[in-house]
Amino acid sequence: MDIKDKRIAILAPVAWRTPPRAYGAWETVASNITEGLVARGWKNITLFATKESITKAKLVAFVEKGYEEDKTQIPKVSECLHISKVMQHADEFDLIHNNFDYLPLTYLPFIKTPMLTTIHGFSDPDILRVYHDHKDTYYVSISDSDRNKDLPYLATVYNGIDLSNLTFRQTPGDKLIWLGRIHLDKGTHLAIEVAKRCNMDLLIAGIIQDQQYFDNLIKPYLNYSSIQYIGPVNPTARDALFKEAYAVIHLNTIPERFGLVLAETMAAGVPVIAMDLGSCREVIADKQTGYLVNNVEEAVEAVGKIDSIDRRKCRQHVEENFTIDCMVRGYEKVYEEIFRREKQKNKE
Amino acid sequence: MDIKDKRIAILAPVAWRTPPRAYGAWETVASNITEGLVARGWKNITLFATKESITKAKLVAFVEKGYEEDKTQIPKVSECLHISKVMQHADEFDLIHNNFDYLPLTYLPFIKTPMLTTIHGFSDPDILRVYHDHKDTYYVSISDSDRNKDLPYLATVYNGIDLSNLTFRQTPGDKLIWLGRIHLDKGTHLAIEVAKRCNMDLLIAGIIQDQQYFDNLIKPYLNYSSIQYIGPVNPTARDALFKEAYAVIHLNTIPERFGLVLAETMAAGVPVIAMDLGSCREVIADKQTGYLVNNVEEAVEAVGKIDSIDRRKCRQHVEENFTIDCMVRGYEKVYEEIFRREKQKNKE
């Protein structure tokens, strides 16, 4: 049997539509995996998501709308109905690929179909109680650094990004850029410090996730010339922003789990100066597509060395490692390994 | 086989210890059912609750403490682990009696053991999505009035109360009493109006559930003589309070689901004047153990007729209908009916 005939259920969260209209990182990845598998010739892909979701695979849905888009819903009600229904269909599939988080694992003892869980993040240490209770299943991490040491992982599969709307540009802009959710974790204030010390302009883009942080540590430094906040950017505006970028400054203060923005930046040919924390070292090729630094001092130095980065190399690094196709090929290998192990188990 | 040899799993919530140290209505009922069954000679009762729970039945637990008593826990994590474990043990039981709410129902398609769910309340209309998705299981309502018309109920089984700490007193006190959670739903402000119009003293006891309601509609009328707020009362203080009671005024503004306080009041021999809404008509014998009224006017009239109520009759009404033993006998009948139906099913 051709592996691409295997029946795969992709389980998406139901907070947002899949793919989401705007925010919804896990729904985005679930969509990219689903559409990526279809594009690579998989014939029996089923997406479990909200009813209004859009896919070239077969859509099976029990929840009308994302609970974040319909506040009459109690999230837990939608979640447990959605998951229970998927599990009731389990024997129609050769593999369930769970992109939902921990709740589906508690239904695992009742089904025979193997399940692969991509752990998109540990939102709270307490959710480890569920993962640690299920060590005989299959896990994928989204970076080597975002692993819990007590869990058995099959592989790391990096998130893949959609390269449309990310134009490669050989010619550097003349500004520093900060892009992301404005929050202490993402170190927006450190980008301001770097810009001031380099005497360069800084454009800050993204949603304000922590208003108090913004009011206290960002707003006082804004002006209408050298340091500007331009608000959230959609993919088109983001592409225009990268045109102005000399480099992106990403001095995260906690370990990155993956760092989509790093991959997006490099895809546009823009080098990144990032804190050497978490997955940054895995996503950026140090001294080739940007610089890994440990503090503002080193970041300022790195700005001085940006001209030695080949912007074509940045784009190439993403094309070779962080496209949707790369991600799907990663999952194909994982699926293959699961089928091999399951076959072995059934023999024993 | 003696029905009392049947293996019953009582599934309690894990918000609090079972029985709870203070608050925890559903844990209280789960405990009363468990201990009541043991007291009536059931030999194979297993309580699924937190590890520190106390029972004469067999305790099986997976969650250390109630998540309301240990804020490091994510409630959903404890809930789904607890329920999943119960379900994994399902085939060791002849019946699972779910006192947990709707989440266990979503695991029902994966087990063969029948489940009885006591619906202790519809916290939000959205949870009906789960109940309506499971109409081929067994339900009990806690009053005839607290029923959803689209659900198949086997019976109503009223909550049973523990009569210890509820001393019967023949001699009336001279005060009006209001007892409960201070909230608009419970009509504390209407009790004040009744007391003022009757020119009688009023003692208000219970937790403040809605501080704004208390500040705006209760506090302005308090003084240190005729209208007093005495705070929450434990069972001993409650017993002392009933000694002072001429009548309890309970002018709820939304339908009662059951009304434990009504039963507790009558157990002490105290008549209740209650709004004719929801289950009040089922718990109070109108004109025999109190009065059902439709507004403050009628409540004031009813106060004038309290002397015609036989306080012994109030106590007797509770003894005959709302003790733990009554409740457990109610559940015994329901269990018997479930076993009969299951036997029938297996024949077909």
Image: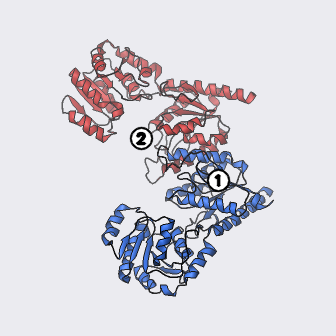
Chain colours: A blue, B red
Q: Which residue is mark 2?
A: B21
Query: Which chain contains the residue that carries disc 1?
Result: A
Which circle, 1 or 2, is nearer the viewer? 1
Q: Answer with left or right where residue B113 lies relative to residue B220.
A: right
Element under disc 2: loop
The single residue placed furthest to the top in the displayed view is: B308
Which residue is found at the position 41% from the left and 17% from the top?
B285
Residue type pointed to by label 2? Arg
Quadrant (top left, top right, bottom left, bottom right) of the C terminus of chain B: top right
Residue B66 point in image, percent of width and height: 47, 46
Which residue is found at the position 51% from the left and 87% from the top?
A308
Q: Answer with left or right where residue B78 lies relative to residue B92.
A: left
What crowding class fits label 1: few (fewer than 14 Cα within 10 Å), some (14-19), or many (20 or more)?
Answer: many
Residue A154 point in image, percent of width and height: 66, 65
Quadrant (top left, top right, bottom left, bottom right) of the N terminus of chain B: top right
Query: Which chain contains the residue that carries disc 2?
Result: B
Residue B100 in view = no
Which residue is found at the position 66% from the left and 63% from the top?
A36
Q: Which residue is mark 1?
A: A47
